């Protein structure tokens, strides 16, 4: 079972994330990290929009905050979101990567460095190639990797970039991805 | 990406040599972030192995300076988080302006964007009784800050931030075109600014201030080092002085945090309070 699920998405991924969050029971145990491209200068509104239809409270973590079970996290605006030793988040304002901050590559790279085969990485619809290289590194470190199938994705560029680097990557539709996540939870928590 | 040969032992060895050869202490930097910076620096300088990197650090002071500049993060913006600067304008600086001189420290000022931001803000408020000390670990970025030369393409974002801050004038008033790609900030903005080299990690308190800005600096440190640096900053503040950190930083787990009360949880502004024994 996974200790962490990291999901990267950009243009066209927001409705998919909403759908996942709507189906996620409050008792879901495995921490989920959402790294989504978003406007740099708008700090508010995004997390609130994601919270609307979810039984989970979605949190934008502070630097060095502990990664906790049962939580859903969103990478804050204008920071890279990383994992660090001791199951903590670590933030950075370093240069944009693939024109993005938060960058999905940075998240996949550091979360897979810490969690290795205990990580599930998912890439969704998006209009640039951010995330593909990071997911490739994650796979090399033993993580399970999934892409939304390009046939279904609103914008295919991100899934196709991942498939280009990993021709054998598991390709699923969003309903199958949600089903996979729901059926692969570590032990459920009491709420 | 974190390179395959960059593991805990490798960064321990590399930071060990930086310390023993040149007294730069990266041993308590945030691990994965530091690993990414080292991996990236090796690519930039086309260094094939850790052994080669270590030899270069030991033998080449200039290289080490360049390396330090690459592994420390120097990305910054003018008026980053416009609502933070509005808060300073509305609530904090009017209070501090009652002092005979406002003493401000930009701790780890990098290439100086926030120093110019502060000077512009004070200028627009009509406050002239201030003194700014801006420090950084790296000489080269200090020289860059002093020169006031910035890439023209960065001015678009800086101007957007300034406009969201609701600045008083056309931002173009504060700089001139230096060349096609480069602008030069109005040097008059630095008339009350002094730069000096200071390393927050191995440095000691050198003065006391009414306002310290240390925004998005401690995120590169591990929790143990954050604890030490907050203590150094706390010792550099008068009772009643203010501290500003980055919007997603926290001092909650630092021992010195009990010397502070929260002035703005949203903009991460804290005030040093009088505690028993201080």
Image: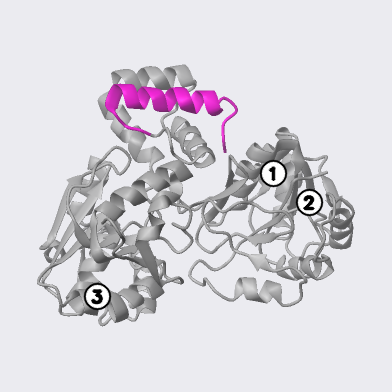
Circle 3 sits in a helix, a strand or a loop, which is it? helix
Label 3 or label 2, whichever lies nearer to me, is: 3
Q: Nearer the viewer, residue B242 or B267?
A: B242
Tell me the quarter of the image containing the C terminus of chain B: bottom left
Q: Residue at x 42, y 32 (%)?
A: B27
CB atoms at circles 1 and 2 under 8 Å apart? yes
**Residue A35 locus on image (x, y percent):** 64, 57
Please name the residue that numbered disc 1 is placed on: A135
Relative to A127, residue B110 above or below: above
**Are tags 3 and 2 found on a single chain?**
no
The verdict on residue B267 being magenta is: no
Question: Dot 1: what SS?
Answer: helix
Same chain shared by disc 1 and disc 2? yes
Q: Position of residue B24 (x, y in %)?
A: 32, 32
Comparing B91 with A136, the one in front is: B91
| Residue tagged 2 | A147
Mark 1 or 2 closer to N-term? 1
3D distance between C-alphas at marks 3 and 2: 50 Å
For disc 3, the marked residue is B93
**The residue marked by circle 3 belongs to what chain?**
B
- For label 1, the crowd category at 10 Å Cα-Cα, with few meaning under 14, some 14 to 19 and many 20 or more, is many
């Amino acid at each position: 079972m996974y200790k962490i699920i990291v999901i990267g998405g950009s243009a066209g991924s927001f409705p998919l994330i909403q759908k996942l969050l709507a189906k996620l029971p409050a008792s879901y145990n495995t921490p989920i990290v959402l790294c989504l491209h978003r406007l740099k200068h708008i700090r508010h509104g995004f997390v609130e929009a994601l919270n609307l239809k979810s039984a989970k409270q979605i949190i934008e973590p502070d630097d060095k905050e502990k990664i906790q079970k049962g939580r859903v996290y969103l990478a804050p605006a204008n920071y890279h979101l990383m994992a660090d030793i001791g199951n903590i988040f670590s933030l950075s304002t370093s240069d944009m990567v693939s024109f993005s901050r938060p960058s999905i590559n940075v998240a996949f790279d550091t979360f897979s460095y810490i969690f290795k085969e205990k990580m599930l990485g998912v890439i969704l619809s998006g209009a640039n190639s951010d995330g593909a290289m990071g997911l490739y590194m994650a796979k090399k470190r033993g993580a399970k990797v999934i892409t939304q199938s390009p046939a279904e994705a609103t914008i295919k560029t991100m899934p196709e970039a991942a498939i280009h680097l990993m021709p054998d990557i598991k390709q699923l539709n969003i309903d199958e991805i949600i089903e996979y996540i729901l059926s692969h939870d570590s032990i459920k928590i009491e709420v | 990406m974190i390179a395959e040969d960059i593991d805990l032992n490798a960064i321990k060895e590399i930071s060990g040599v930086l310390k023993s050869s040149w007294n730069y202490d990266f041993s308590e930097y945030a691990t994965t972030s530091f690993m990414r910076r080292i991996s990236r620096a090796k690519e930039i300088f086309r260094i094939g192995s850790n052994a080669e990197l270590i030899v270069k650090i030991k033998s080449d002071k200039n290289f080490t300076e360049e390396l330090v500049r690459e592994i420390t993060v120097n990305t910054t913006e003018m008026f980053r988080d416009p609502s933070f600067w509005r808060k300073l304008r509305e609530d904090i600086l009017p209070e501090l302006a009652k002092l005979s001189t406002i003493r401000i420290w930009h701790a780890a000022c990098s290439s100086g964007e926030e120093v110019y931001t502060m000077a512009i803000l004070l200028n627009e408020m009509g406050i002239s009784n201030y003194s700014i000390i801006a420090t950084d670990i790296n000489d080269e970025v200090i020289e860059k800050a002093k020169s006031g030369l910035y890439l023209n393409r960065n001015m678009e974002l800086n101007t957007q931030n300034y406009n969201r801050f609701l600045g008083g004038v056309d931002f173009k008033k504060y700089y001139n075109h230096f060349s096609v790609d480069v602008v030069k900030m109005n040097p008059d903005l630095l008339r009350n600014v002094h730069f000096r080299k200071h390393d927050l990690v191995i440095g000691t308190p050198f003065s006391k201030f009414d306002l310290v800005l240390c925004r998005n600096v401690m995120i590169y440190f591990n929790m143990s080092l954050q604890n030490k640096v907050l203590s150094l900053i706390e010792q550099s503040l008068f009772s009643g002085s203010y501290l500003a950190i980055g919007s997603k930083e926290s001092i909650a787990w630092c021992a010195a945090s009990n010397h502070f009360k929260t002035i703005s949880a949203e903009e991460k502004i804290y005030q040093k309070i009088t505690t028993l024994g201080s």
